[in-house]
Image: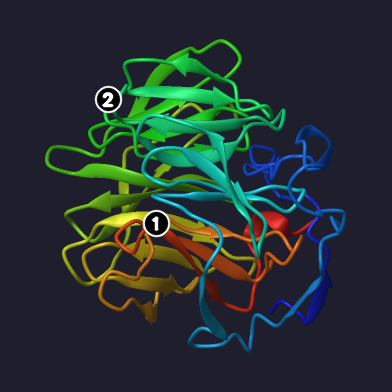
Amino acid sequence: MLPHRMISLLLACTSSLAVVEKHPRDSGTADTADTADTADTSDTEPVPVDYDCDALPSAPVEDNELTAPRGYHDVLISGDGYAYGFDGNSIVRSTYEGPLEVFLPRAGNIQQMDWLPDGDMVVGDDFSQDLKRIDNTGVSSVIASGLGAVYGVVTGPDDHVWVANGPSIYRVDPSTGEAKEWSRLGRGVQAHSLAFKPGDPRLFIGSVGTGIVYTVAFDENYARAGEPEQYLTIDGTGWHDGVGFDACGNLFVADYYTSGLYRVAPDLSVTTFFRGRQRAYGHGLEWGNGVGGWRADALYLPQPYDQNTVREVVIGVPSAWSVE
């Protein structure tokens, strides 16, 4: 039982296992972005979240379609209060209430995104089949090439970038560009989205076509330590566009085929937490950070079939990686 508690969303975590010590989703730093000409983002202290793991809501506390931000298959929220996303042509950014501005024009075809340990952005471009670094001025450079149709991108607790392109999962050193195929799920099974859980030496993998979320164990050096195993099955054909854990150990899965957002409890019971309407449902998921109006207990879901708008689904509990 996790007691009723207050947390401050500082970018750190604790873990019982040495292999998972560092926050895999650094939200950038306020001193790396030039915000003077756009909006007042001086309020960069995270707002605390009050939650009780034994009394979580069974449906969204709030469901809001936001007017300012844009996202295609992912959205990133920085430590100085900006949401970054791809609008189908450019990487754009906005504060919670706007305005929206172009950050990197003609960016490629950007899929999922994350923060690197140094505060730069890492993005997957499935058109050029590259993994790219984008610095705080909007300058883009290639980290690694030839990775196929990149979709899932997450910075792991090992400070490497983990990439899912369907057939393969790659582990990429962002400082050298060295990319090694780390695992495959097997014939006919596509790896699509990736997540880590604090204190758990496994990679969690959302798939395409089976409805199954898989795991692959790793050792203290993040070398693969086992074969892919089935973690759970979600009803439906299965097209897992986003996976991530909350601070109570629940796994959230955004599914394309059913337009659903699912919550999987630690006992592996599955709840349909949110069902999208028409084309308004999530293709990826990202927690807010409690800064600049972005709620730390909300998931931000990019909606590519709804003019790349972003949906705010308040779930009442922050990310697993926000807990000290």
User: Measured from the top left, where is residue 191 in percent x and y?
Assistant: 29, 42
Residue 307, image quadrant: bottom left
Question: Would you name the residue on which mark 1 appears?
Answer: 308
Vertical side of 75 occupied by 122: above or below: above
Q: Residues within 10 Å of mark 2 (few under 14, many from 20)?
A: many
Q: Residue at x 50, y 17 (%)?
A: 143
Instruction: Report if residue 249 is visible in the image.
Output: no
Label 2, secondary structure: give it.
loop
Work out whether residue 320 or residue 59 is closer to the camera in this orientation and state it. Answer: 59
Q: Residues within 10 Å of mark 1 (few under 14, many from 20)?
A: many
Amino acid tagged 1:
Asn
Percent x, y for residue 244?
Answer: 50, 57
Quadrant where the N terminus sits is: bottom right
Query: How many numbered marks, from 0 up?
Result: 2
> Is residue 317 visible in the rendered structure shown here?
yes
Q: Residue at x 49, y 88 (%)?
A: 58
Quarter placement of the C terminus:
bottom right
Residue 297: x and y, percent?
Answer: 65, 71
User: Which labelled disc corresponds to residue 148?
Assistant: 2
Q: Nearer the viewer, residue 254 or 220?
A: 254
Residue drawn 29% across the image and 27% down it? 127
Q: Position of residue 321 (x, y in %)?
A: 67, 54
Circles 1 and 2: CB atoms closer than 8 Å:
no
Q: Residue at x 76, y 61 (%)?
A: 292
307 or 21: nearer the viewer: 307
Q: Type of residue at label 2? A: Gly
> In the rendered structure, which disc, 1 or 2, sits on the residue that comes first in sequence?
2
Image quadrant in which you'd find residue 315: bottom right
